[in-house]
Image (spheres, rainbow, N blue to C red):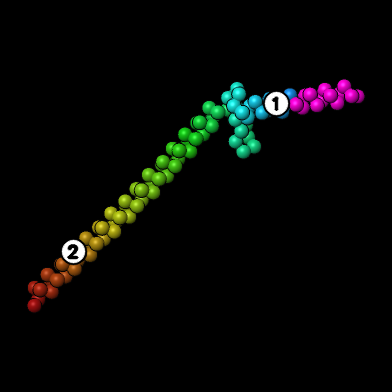
């Protein structure tokens, strides 16, 4: 009975040691949240996230530029309309 308990304890310690080795980066393993992953996979995951963020930021910039252009075009149209209405009024005076 005592030997069984010692054996179980030893196995538990060995298992914990293996897990710690993986977490500490031996054999290329790491821990992210509760998940173990290969470091190579994390790098790919980070690259994907960066690409998504870049794409999102570029999209936001493009939307901002489009909005700015639209506002400028509206101003130009308003100015042209006011100028044309002045000319129209001038011809009648």
Residue 77 placement (x, y as % from top left): 22, 62
Q: Name, please, the residue furthest toward the bottom.
A: 93
- Please report whichever mark, 2 or 1, sits nearer to the chain's N-terminal start: 1
Q: Give the residue at mark 1.
A: 17
Residue 11 placement (x, y as % from top left): 77, 24
Q: Name, please, the residue furthest toward the right.
A: 1
Residue 65 placement (x, y as % from top left): 31, 51
The answer to whether the residues at label 2 and label 1 have Cβ atoms under 8 Å apart is: no
Residue 38's image quarter? top right
Q: Give the residue at mark 2.
A: 80
Q: Which mark is residue 41?
A: none
Considering only vertical position in the picture, is 74 above or below 26? below
Q: Quadrant of the N terminus?
A: top right
Would you say the magenta stretch is mainly helix, strand or loop? Answer: helix
Closer mark to the observer between disc 2 and disc 1: 1
Residue 70 is left or right of residue 84, and the answer is right
Q: Secondary structure at mark 1?
A: helix
Residue found at x 63% / y 27%: 22
Numbered range of the magenta stretch: 1-13
Residue found at x 51% / y 34%: 45
Q: Secondary structure at mark 2?
A: helix
Considering only vertical position in the picture, is 50 above or below 86? above
């Amino acid at each position: 009975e005592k030997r069984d308990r010692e054996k179980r304890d030893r196995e538990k310690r060995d298992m914990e040691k293996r897990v710690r080795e993986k977490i500490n980066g031996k054999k290329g393993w790491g821990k992210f949240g509760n998940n173990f992953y290969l470091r190579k996979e994390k790098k790919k995951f980070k690259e994907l996230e960066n690409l998504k963020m870049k794409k999102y930021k570029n999209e936001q910039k493009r939307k901002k530029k489009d909005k700015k252009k639209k506002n400028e075009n509206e101003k130009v149209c308003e100015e042209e309309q006011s100028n044309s209405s002045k000319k129209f009024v001038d011809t009648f005076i």
